């Protein structure tokens, strides 16, 4: 399931925790998309 209401820190933590899964992981994809879209609020 994709995470909702991400912050920059949460997205980075998700990428780190799910890096072994890569692009086939929905959580990894959501975090990567959030960071690449520049939606961080920090």
Image (cartoon, rainbow, N blue to C red):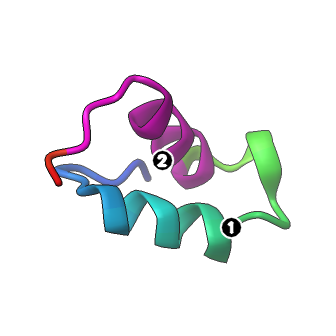
Residue at x 77% of width, y 42% of height: 24
- Binning the other alpha carbons within 10 Å of mark 1 as few (below 14), some (14 to 19) or many (20 upward) gives some
Q: Position of residue 33 (x, y in %)?
A: 49, 31
- Total marks shown come to 2
Question: Could you classify mark 2 by the number of other residues whose Cα lies within 10 Å: few (under 14), some (14-19), or many (20 or more)?
Answer: many
Q: Residue at x 48, y 47 (%)?
A: 31
Circle 2/circle 1 CB separation < 8 Å = yes
**Local SS, label 2:** helix
Residue 34: image location, x then y, percent: 39, 36
Q: Quadrant of residue 38?
A: top left
Mark identifier at residue 31: 2
Residue 18, labelled with which disc?
1
Decide: is 21 above or below 31: below
**Residue 30 vertical placement versus 5 (above, below):** above
Residue 42 x/y as whole percent: 17, 54
Callout 1: helix, strand or loop?
loop
The residues tagged by marks 2 and 1 sit, at their Cα atoms, a distance apart of: 10 Å
Foreground residue, 14 or 1?
14
Identified at 44% across, 39% down, the residue is 35
Specify the principal SS of the magenta part: helix
Residue 5 is covered by the magenta coloring: no
Q: Residue at x 33, y 54 (%)?
A: 3
Question: Which region of the structure is painted magenta?
Answer: 27-40
């Amino acid at each position: 399931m994709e995470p909702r209401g991400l912050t920059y820190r949460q997205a980075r933590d998700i990428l780190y925790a799910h890096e072994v899964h890569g692009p086939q992981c929905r959580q990894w994809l959501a975090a990567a998309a959030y960071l690449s879209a520049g939606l961080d609020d920090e």
